[in-house]
Image (tube, rainbow, N blue to C red):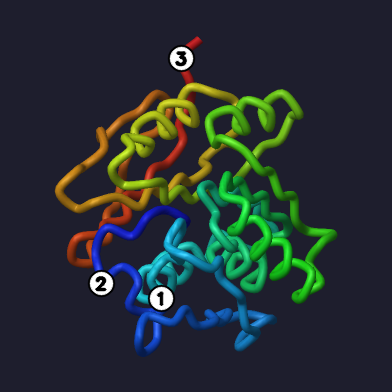
Amino acid sequence: MAHPAPAAHAVSTARGRRGAVTALRIIAGVLKGRRLVTARGDTTRPTADQVRIALLDTLAPRLAGARFLDLFAGAGGVGLEALSRGAAQATFVERDARAIAALRANVATLELEASVRVQRGDVLKELTALDRDGERFDLVFLDPPYEAGLVETTLETLGGGGLLRAEAWVIAQHFTKRVPAPTVGALAAFRTRRFGETTLTFYRAGPRSP
C-alpha cells in the first residue's frame, strides 16, 4: 500500500486541507476507530479508504485465523485492518525508512507486536528470505509503485515459489489500464474490482506443476 502517488484521487482520503497528512483509522473489527499514523512526506501513500474497505470486506470470510502478507506495506493500514478483522498474524514488507517508522509506531500503539513481523528491505529479496524461513500465507496484498513494473515481477515470484498455502488468495492493486496477466505461475485471476484509475485483481493459488 505504499508508493508514490501518481494521481490526486489516490491520496484524497489521506490528506486534509492544504495537503496536510491526516491520521487514518481502523475501519472495522476489534480495533475499529483506532487511529493510524502515516509516513510524512510524499515517498509513500496509504491505500484510499474506498479501496481498503472494498478489499477487506471482500476478504472478510477468509480472515479468521489467516496469515496475512502485506507487501509494499507503507504504514501498514491494510495488514493492521486485517488483524483487527480476525487475521491471526500479519507480515509487513516495506523499504522506506519513514514508512517503517510509522508502521512500527502503529504496531506498538495497537499492542500487536505478538502478531506482527516487520521486514525492511526490497520486496523481492524479502520474499526469498521469508520462503527460506518457511513462512506460508493464506492472503497476500501487494500495492507496489505503479510505474516500476513490480506488480508483474512480484506476482511471478509469488506464483512460482512456496510462500502460498493451498487455495491462498493474492490481491494486486494496479493501474486499471495496466492489466496483469490472468495466470502467473500457480496463480489464476478470478475477480476484479475497479475504482476509477485503480483496480484490484484477485488471484487464487492452484496446484503447481511438478
Task: For marks 2 and 1, give the one nearer the viewer.
Answer: 2
* Residue 89 position by quadrant: bottom right
Residue 190 locus on image (x, y percent): 31, 46
The first of marks 1 and 3 along the sequence is: 1
At horizontal 63% and vertical 66% (from top left) the residue drawn is 80
Residue 159 locus on image (x, y percent): 45, 28
Q: Is residue 53 left or right of residue 64?
A: left
- Mark 2 burial class by Cα count in 10 Å: few <14, some 14-19, many 20+: few
Q: Nearer the viewer, residue 4 or 171?
A: 4
Q: Which residue is mark 1?
A: 49
- Mark 3 burial class by Cα count in 10 Å: few <14, some 14-19, many 20+: few
Q: Which residue is mark 3?
A: 209
Q: Residue furthest left?
A: 177
Q: Nearer the viewer, residue 205 or 150?
A: 150
The first of marks 2 and 1 along the sequence is: 2
Q: Is residue 196 left or right of residue 118?
A: left
Query: Judging from the image, what secondary structure is the residue with disc 1 in?
Result: helix
Label 2 vs label 1: CA separation?
A: 11 Å
The first of marks 2 and 3 along the sequence is: 2
Kind of residue at badge 3: Ser
Contact? badges 1 and 3 (CB < 8 Å): no
Q: Nearer the viewer, residue 36 or 84?
A: 36
Q: Which residue is mark 2?
A: 9
Query: Judging from the image, what secondary structure is the residue with disc 3 in?
Result: loop
Residue 182 locus on image (x, y percent): 26, 35
